[in-house]
Image (cartoon, rainbow, N blue to C red):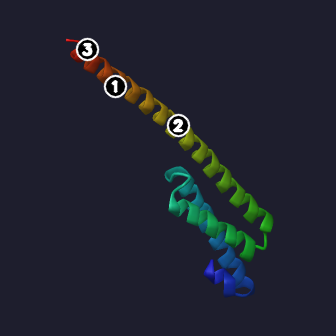
Amino acid sequence: MYLAEFKTRVEHKEATENTLLAYKSARDIALAELAPTHSIRLGLALNFSVFYYEILNSPDRACNLTKQVSLLNLNFLRDLNLNLTLLTTNLEEESGDEIKEAEGKRESSEQQ
């Protein structure tokens, strides 16, 4: 990306095309290999959106990329929150059952 920032004319076009191909390749790998919240994947998306905005002068593409990443992370966080809620509920139920069993054993031993 940095070459595309200061090169002129033909060199600028070539550097821009090479950078775009590199970002697309990195994005494809990141989508296949990294979790939506992985810091490298998020950093790549940020840099790619800056490239769209500043080098390609395409704020719409930059915004769309940012929205896609945001939606992926929101969905991931919703799923994570749901799973944590279910785990907490299960833990509370299991703990409640253990407390009831312990109280029952204590009452039974006190009656004897």
- Under circle 1, the secondary element is helix
Question: Residue drawn 72% across and 69% down?
Answer: 52
Three-letter code, disc 2: Thr
Nearer-N-terminus badge (2/3): 2
- For label 3, the residue is 108
Query: Which residue is drawn at the image coordinates 19% and 11% (left, top)?
Result: 112
Q: Tell whether 77 sits left or right of 33.
A: right
Classify 58 as above or below 93.
below
Look at the picture and state if 95 lies above or below 112: below
Element class at badge 2: helix
Q: Residues within 10 Å of mark 2 (few under 14, many from 20)?
A: few
- Give the residue furthest to the front: 111
Counting labels gives: 3
Q: Residues within 10 Å of mark 3 (few under 14, many from 20)?
A: few
Q: Where is residue 110 drawn, in percent x and y?
A: 23, 17
On the image, the x and y values in percent for residue 2 come to 62, 81
Q: Amino acid at mark 3?
A: Ser
Please, what is the three-letter code of the amino acid marked with disc 1? Glu
